Amino acid sequence: MQNGQARRTEFVFSCARTITFLVLCFLASTPSYAQKDNRIVIGTTEVIHSSVLGEDRTILVHVPQGEPGQRYPVLYVLDGEDHFGSAVAITEQLSGVFPQLIVVGIENTARQRDLTPDKGHIGKILSASESARSGGGGNFMSFLEKDLIPYVDGHYPSAPYRILSGHSLGGLAVINAFFNHTALFNAYIAIDPSLWWDDQDWVKAAEKTFLKKDFANRRLFVAAANNIPAGYDVKSILKDKTGLAPVTQAVLPFVSFLRENKLKGLDWSTKFYENERHGTVELNAEYDALRYIFRDFEFNVRLFDEHPDWDRYALLEAHYKQVSQRMGYTVLPSESMVNQLGYACMERHQMKQALALFERNTNEHPHSANAFDSLGDYYSAAGDKPKAMEAFSKSLTLGATKETRQKLDELKGK
């Protein structure tokens, strides 16, 4: 459809695939997913028109069920028909460790065309017909930049932090984006990327100019599967000239290049998955990559067990100020985390800090019954009966609970 219109349907998992079973195991304990007619619905399928590619494209979209007005970073997943479900499961399971994410799975129409940066050489791996339908990566990146990202930003509560993830040829497309469209995404996940493409000529040419680029505030994770055949090790497979393990024979030298040349401003990591093959590495690598990219997002409440006298409120403020600077937009702590810290301060009789935390929650979440109930608990503990009654009464107007009603009645002497 033109002018930003799209056909939208629910994305419902079928039990036909093994990965679906794994995803459902992840999601079974997550109550936020809408259930209709006993189906587990985790997102929508949309068809949008690409003016750049001159065709309709199908995307799968998952939006977390967070607080009203909340905005989320966006994870764009290539080969969405295969990897969307597992990505959603990971992001939901680990929300809190890293931020909740909108997940956009991009389905393929012409995979080899879109995910390859140039026409590949005809050779041992690539046939003449495969070469002929390759090399559309530039147009595909323009589709992401001019069609897809503006559509997502215009129709969903996205925050200005974007991640691109891809496996195999999708990983090749990620490296293409990382080099030629560095500012388009904040973080890049290349999972066992097909850097063998074009007899490695493309990636070697890119490496020569990497040293001149500025990768400030960009993060990259490169995953390498163990595709080494029996009887070989890393050293011997890299000497092989017959192409026994083309992905590994291209990815490992690229990782060596990154290690030997400190690219300006780049924050990157890599992992070799000894027990995973090319076809099994995606799930573990996606998990590890997101943990790496957001490794400094989580507020470490365990510090206060070692340092009970530290000012929780001041440290919370400092932490999320730093996170916001890195993410490029204001990131606030969750209501539950602030609540947890408030009660911890009360237990240690740090009442000034506790009040600041509970008041922060009522200011940032003025429609939360729980925030005002907690504030009422504080005033009860502090011996301020009028303010406790006021807070409990406010909580009941936002969402009556038996527990809050009982606390208010006790203060009234009923």
Image (spheres, rainbow, N blue to C red):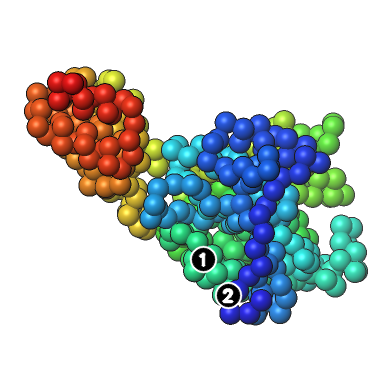
Q: Amino acid at mark 2?
A: Gly
Residue at left offset 28%, top offset 37%: 396
**For this view, does 134 lie left or right of residue 30?**
right
Residue 256: give x, y in percent of width and height: 61, 47
Residue at left offset 81%, top offset 41%: 16
Q: Is residue 225 visible?
A: no
**For this view, does 108 lie left or right of residue 391?**
right
Residue 183: give x, y in percent of width and height: 48, 66
Residue 309: give x, y in percent of width and height: 17, 24
Residue picked out by circle 2: 4
Which secondary structure, mark 2?
loop
Q: Is residue 148 visible?
A: yes
Give the camera-side residue of 199 and 173: 173
Q: Amino acid at mark 1?
A: His
Residue picked out by circle 1: 155
Residue 50: give x, y in percent of width and height: 66, 75
Q: CA distance from mark 2 to mark 1?
A: 9 Å
Give the camera-side residue of 118 and 324: 324
Residue at left offset 30%, top offset 47%: 367
Dividing the image into 4 quarters, which one contains the C terminus? top left
The quadrant where residue 24 appears: top right
Dividing the image into 4 quarters, which one contains the N terminus? bottom right
